[in-house]
Amino acid sequence: MCVILLSFLPATAQNVPTPEKFLGYKLGDQFTPHDRLVRYFETVANQATDRCKLVPYGQTYEGRPLMVMAVATPENMNRLEEIRTNNLKITGLVSGTPSSVQPAIVWLSYNVHGNEAVSSEAVMQVLYDLVNPTNTEIQGWLKNMVVLLDPCLNPDGHERYVQWYKQVANFPYQPLPFSREHQEPWPGGRFNHYLFDLNRDWAWQTQQETQQRVALYNQWMPHLHADFHEMGPESPYYFAPSAKPYHEALTPWQRQFQQHIGEANRKYFDKNYWLYFTREKYDLLYPSFGDTWPSFNGAIGMTYEQGGSGRAGLGYVTSEGDTLTLTKRIAHHVAASYASIEAVASHGDQVLKEFKTYFDQSRNNPQGAYKGYLIKAKGDESKVQSIAQLLDRNGIRYSYANKGGSVKGFNYATGKSEAAKIEENDLVISAYQPKSVMLRALFDPKPMLEDSLTYDLTSWAIPYAFGVKAYGLPDAIASGNTSDKPKSPTSAQPPAVAKPYAYLVEWKDLRDIQFLSALLKKKIKIRNSEVAFEMNGKTFASGTLLITRTGNEALGDAFDTFITDQAKLAGIIPTPVSTGFVDKGFDFGSDYNHFIKAPRIGLVTGSGISTDGFSSTWHFFEQQIHYPISVIDVSRLSSVPLQQLDILILPSGSYSGVWNERMINKLKDWIQDGGKVIAIENAAEVLGEKADFEWKKKDEDKPSPKKVNSPADTLKIYGHRDREYIAEDIQGSIYQVTLDNTHPLAFGYDKSIAILFRNNSPYELMKKGWNVGYLQTTNYTAGHVGYKTKAKLQNSAIFGVQEMGRGQIIYMAENPVFRAFWHSGKLLFGNAVFMVGQAY
Ligand SMILES: [Zn+2]
């Protein structure tokens, strides 16, 4: 046997190919496909083993690799793992005494929005310069620093853009904006596979890419995180300081460092006479961005924005007549990368000192009004499990109450300070922990706005998003009364029954829908109860699933194991019963218990459909409840044989030209025959404009309720034009929508549901049809709503059901499963799909 011994050469600049040498073209001459980007990173990692290390952290939905490159001096590279764990000891996330010598950790993230593709070009230059030992200025910065480079956070979106561009671009490129290469088709490369915006997903982590990235982030906890973006091609460069509003939880040091970042960037941009702006547009409020989430985790967080994005291509003529080239865009992002590193290098000691102070305070003296949170578990065990998973993903610690007690706190449901009972298994979260600030941000009942102009949602608190009873506690929770795991009280386990007559499953949460979906796919016959009933001293609410042995004989003796196995998979506990005779209510054979037909579902997508609307419903079926659907392009809708579907889901969209007379008649005929339409947001509005559809927008011309003393008071001020729209604006605000929970659309809910509002187009209460969800006058809970919209939303319909022949139309003014994080609306959407219409 012959063994070849390899001797490893020390890395030098000569070993590491420049991006140009490796790619065969100059950076900026072409867009680089993701696999070539990965190969360049691997090549550099193999050549400069003493200066960098590739850390794979997962893969995308389409199977592309995700990774970061750690870059450091050879001395720091040798102790990379020690540096990482030492940093975690400083935060308190791992126990142990940290050593005092610690380099700063800088994490630079590129290309979270796939079609902002300049980032993944710029990062190749940044990597080359960082590992180049002859670049003395950069090597000087690196003496006390580790840099982590994520070359592409969203490879699937990046490839969608780059491959499209390569197919359509002229050669040489055509810079005129109306040329095809500047008109990216729907849905564009911004989003990931499921068309989610990964820069809105940091806190909620609904997407695989985010889950894997944040898991690695929590293993490093960098001191600075910068997120590289692009905006429209006409805008000059943007860097920090950020615009207002800043979330209250940002520390004085984090605010001050925004200025240092501005200074560091200004130097590069002024020297090159590049145009830029600061302190406008990009704020620091909503905690799920790539700048805010790191900021609430102790880092200095920031966004960079280059003019360009999917419109700019290799070159683009701006309205001023200048040509914006990819080469120029790369130069700006490379400069901002250096400015970020240099800013940390020149404030190194203070960066480390303030980072330590941040976590010392988080553990010992947490900021904010609440020193802990209590989440009631009884009846909401499944939602509490989902919250625990979300806290785990964010690195937030929690425990479960193991004995009773009482406390006083802010009741999220009433908005008042009230007494609360602590009961066994309640989720207890102390603010005295390393991730205290993130905890505060996620539970913030009413984020304070320094300024109403903001970029995204203005309210999001976990108790509302999950629909649980919760309290913010002004006093620290006594330790010693909690345990790491919930007890499994024997009372929750229903008594065993030999060869049960049926199994009952209460209809309460997403897990119950997952269970139903699994059974329907196996063709199990299931009923649901329209009316609450009592058995063995227990009340089963409307919507309870009844799975009788009768009708499922085909499974034979495997019936019981199948049901219990599926329940275990979904994380629920079914109740076996020995009879179909109820103590109170209707027996299992009654007409009030409806057979659930497994629906054949069509979901509309395509140009003109909102990516937010489509992505959240697509992800719901495919990733959350695993139920098969047909995705139908809106341009092909007219040729779809509707009789092969039971449900047609219309996500928000313009539907322009879709509902002509022939198509609307086809749709109505199908509904008359038993079809069901679920029309969401703008899709409901568009349908409501057609004859025989009962969903009507409120009259826009009604006078505003604001008092007017003189006609001059109503004149618009030119200088206030940016703010004019605030009066009509609504930006991710929360309302408790009143429910008619006797209707199947509201099964499993109490008298209201917290819904995130993003539309300022209120609807009339339906005259013919069921107003299942509506607003009265006191339903507002949190977030920014302009005074005009607030008034119009009073007494408006939010969720309505119209019967038409044997079918139904379900109208939804807001998307109850928005961005997959609004958990409390998932059951309502499940009701629309599986419960409504079974009674007919
Ligand atoms: Zn972006």
Image: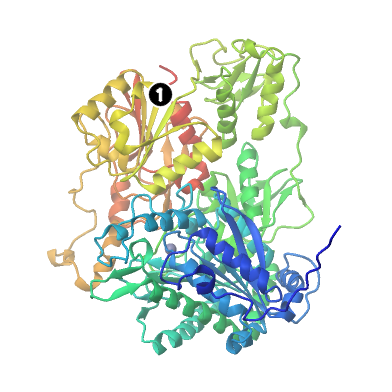
**Taking 120 as reference, is 768 above or below it?**
above
Residue 718 seen anywhere in this rendered image of the structure: yes
Residue 368 seen anywhere in this rendered image of the structure: no
Left or right: 210 as drawn, with respect to 616: right
SS for dot 1? loop
Q: Nearer the viewer, residue 265 or 59?
A: 59
Left or right: 442 as drawn, with respect to 809: right
Instruction: Classify the position of the N terminus by image quarter.
Output: bottom right
Picture mark count: 1
Q: How is the image coloured?
A: rainbow
Residue 624 point in image, percent of width and height? 55, 39
Q: Residue furthest right?
A: 1
**Taking 391 as reference, is 333 above or below it?**
below
Q: Residue at x 37, y 58 (%)?
A: 165
Q: Residue at x 25, y 41 (%)?
A: 697
Q: Quadrant of ligand 1?
A: bottom left
Left or right: 5 as drawn, with respect to 198: right
Q: Amino acid at mark 1?
A: Asp
The quadrant where residue 499 appears = top right
Q: Residue furthest front?
A: 2
Residue 475 point in image, percent of width and height? 66, 61
Q: Residue at x 27, y 61 (%)?
A: 725
The quadrant where residue 772 appears = top left
Q: Nearer the viewer, residue 274 or 385?
A: 274
Instruction: Classify the position of the C terminus by image quarter.
Output: top left
Q: Residue furthest left?
A: 711
Residue 761 point in image, percent of width and height? 29, 47
Residue 26 point in image, percent of width and height? 45, 73
Residue topped by disc 1:
646
Density class for disc 1 (Cα within 10 Å; few <14, some 14-19, many ≥20) is many
